[in-house]
Image (tube, rainbow, N blue to C red):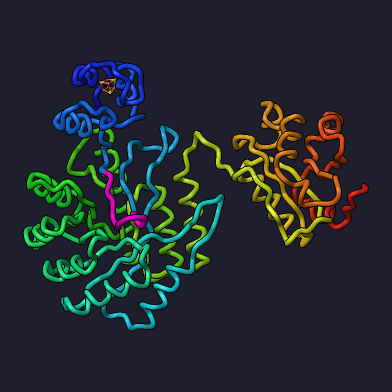
């Protein structure tokens, strides 16, 4: 149960010294309770208090970190059932399966696609995150060789090591060095041996039961043995049962604070169908319904990209509009005679407008003004895309050094500010663009700075 500000205040030294960056202990306690600062920011609290507060304020679904250095993959840490209540914290990890009985061509192809299928969207790199390396024969040498190959070829991939045999998992974990992998999996038959490997190597451990009840039982036992970093596989391999289990796990952890299920899940669309399209459909449901990680049989651009976009949309904060950076964006290789357009930084507007300009093949400069993610008319109505602010932005943007002419195209919906903008930018000719982005290509093809 989370602590209140007053409960936290009782544990603070009450020096009111401000060294934590907050003027008083009371204000600090309130911020800790609200999750805005860490208890560690006060240099005077004891380790015991730190532990008490950290435990009490930990999310109901534990946060698990894999990898190392800059190549960390974090999942779990969720605090709500529905995205609109707050936000979903850590995007579902997408893993691709490699097995020791695949031939080199298959393995290299999957690794090549893991590295190649990366997309830039709204300034975010969209990509798969993990390689799931499965031991098919109990051969520790072959398994370790594949782990080493994965580490050297795909250094930014987090790893899932999959074997029934504790000695194989141990050899694989040691081959990872500092790069922390997920060990998969402790089952009823091997739990003690695999738990020993997890204890020795300090790696998070996946738990797989026959069903959700068996998984909870095993998780409870491992927690009682001191394991904190667990990942759940309820064993479900049909869409109906997996869907139900995902919801039960999440509800039990968040609504009922049921500790044995208070961990992120790992799921296996790759084991649920042989049809790549159906596998993607299953995966798309799991992105929305709480999977911590999902393991796919392969990566194909046409199937992966929509999945990545879905994930991006679901795991963005619904209270913050998606934005692109305020800047000058060159499109189609513009020069000093190319048209200059200005619009807002709502990402959807940016992508639609830049897409139409790109499609027109007319070299252009696109000026993106920071409107805090509001669309053109909303930003104008909120006073964030007014003539004086646009003028200030145009002057400081540096566009005057990039073009010889002094003509700027504003969105058609802002035609009413033309006069004001002419007063603010007396050296510039203000041109009214089309209202709809889809009309930009013919507009740009006929454009002249003298229009
Ligand atoms: S640093 Fe600690 S003692 Fe000082 S004001 Fe902050 S919470 Fe209080």
Quadrant assignment for ligand 1: top left
Q: Would residue 110 appear left or right of 117 to someone viewing this image?
A: left
Q: Does the image show residue 181?
A: no
Q: Where on the picture, by quarter, is residue 134?
A: bottom left
Q: Would residue 113 appear left or right of 266 to someone viewing this image?
A: right
Quarter containing the N terminus? top left
Image coords of residue 277 (percent x, y): 46, 66
Give the vertical position of 137 relative to 430 (above or below): below
Image coords of residue 52 (percent x, y): 17, 30
What residue is drawn where x is 23% and y is 52%? 232
What residue is drawn where x is 26% and y is 57%? 236
Q: Would residue 140 appear left or right of 287 to someone viewing this image?
A: left
Give the vertical position of 439 relative to 149 (above or below): above
Residue 64 lies in magenta, yes or no?
A: yes
What residue is drawn where x is 17% and y is 33%? 51
Give the vertical position of 126 relative to 175 (above or below): above
Image coords of residue 404 (percent x, y): 84, 51
Farthest residue, direction right: 450
Q: Does the image show residue 320?
A: yes
Total numbered labels: 0
What residue is drawn where x is 19% and y is 54%? 211
Residue 320 lies in magenta, yes or no?
A: no
Q: Where on the picture, by quarter, is residue 59?
A: top left
Q: Depth check: 302 or 275 in front? A: 302
Q: Main secondary structure of the magenta part?
A: strand
Image coords of residue 191 (percent x, y): 10, 58
Task: Please provide the residue range marked out in magenta.
Answer: 63-72
């Amino acid at each position: 149960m989370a602590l209140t500000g007053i409960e936290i205040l009782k544990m603070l030294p009450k020096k009111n010294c401000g060294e934590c960056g907050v003027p008083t202990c009371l204000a600090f306690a309130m911020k800790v309770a609200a999750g805005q600062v860490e208890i560690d920011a006060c240099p005077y609290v004891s380790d015991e208090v730190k532990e008490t507060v950290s435990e009490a304020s930990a999310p109901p679904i534990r946060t698990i970190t894999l990898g190392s250095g800059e190549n960390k993959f974090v999942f779990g840490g969720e605090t709500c059932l529905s995205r609109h209540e707050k936000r979903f914290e850590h995007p579902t990890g997408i893993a691709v399966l490699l097995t020791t009985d695949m031939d080199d061509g298959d393995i290299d192809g999957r690794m090549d696609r893991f590295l190649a299928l990366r997309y830039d969207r709204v300034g975010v790199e969209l990509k798969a995150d993990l390689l799931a390396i499965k031991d098919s024969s109990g051969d520790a040498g072959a398994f370790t060789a594949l782990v080493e190959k994965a580490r050297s070829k795909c250094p930014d991939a987090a790893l899932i090591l999959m074997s029934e045999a504790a000695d194989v998992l141990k050899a694989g974990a040691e081959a990872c060095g500092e790069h922390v992998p997920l060990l998969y999996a402790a089952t009823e038959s091997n739990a003690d041996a695999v738990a020993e490997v997890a204890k020795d190597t300090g790696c998070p451990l996946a738990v797989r039961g026959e069903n959700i009840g068996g998984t909870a039982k095993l998780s409870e036992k491992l927690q009682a043995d001191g394991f904190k970093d667990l990942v759940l596989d309820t064993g479900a391999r049909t869409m109906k049962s997996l869907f139900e289990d995902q919801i039960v796990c999440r509800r039990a952890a968040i609504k009922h604070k049921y500790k044995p299920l208070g961990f992120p899940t790992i799921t296996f669309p790759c084991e649920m169908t042989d049809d790549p399209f159906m596998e993607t459909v299953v995966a798309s449901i799991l992105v929305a319904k709480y999977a911590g990680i999902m393991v796919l049989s392969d990566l194909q651009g046409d199937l992966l990209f929509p999945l990545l976009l879905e994930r991006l949309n679901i795991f963005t904060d619904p209270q913050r509009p998606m934005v692109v950076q305020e800047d000058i964006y060159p499109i189609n290789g513009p020069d000093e005679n190319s048209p200059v357009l200005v619009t807002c930084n709502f990402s959807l507007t940016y992508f639609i407008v830049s897409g139409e300009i790109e499609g027109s093949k007319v070299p252009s400069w696109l000026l993106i003004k920071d409107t805090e993610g509001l669309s053109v008319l909303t930003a104008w109505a909120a006073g964030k895309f007014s003539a004086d602010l646009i003028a200030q932005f145009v002057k400081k943007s540096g566009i005057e050094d990039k073009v010889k002419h002094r003509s700027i195209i504003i969105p058609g919906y802002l035609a009413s500010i033309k006069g004001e903008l002419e007063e603010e930018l007396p050296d510039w000719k203000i041109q009214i663009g089309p209202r709809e982005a889809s009309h930009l290509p013919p507009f740009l093809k006929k454009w002249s700075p003298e229009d």
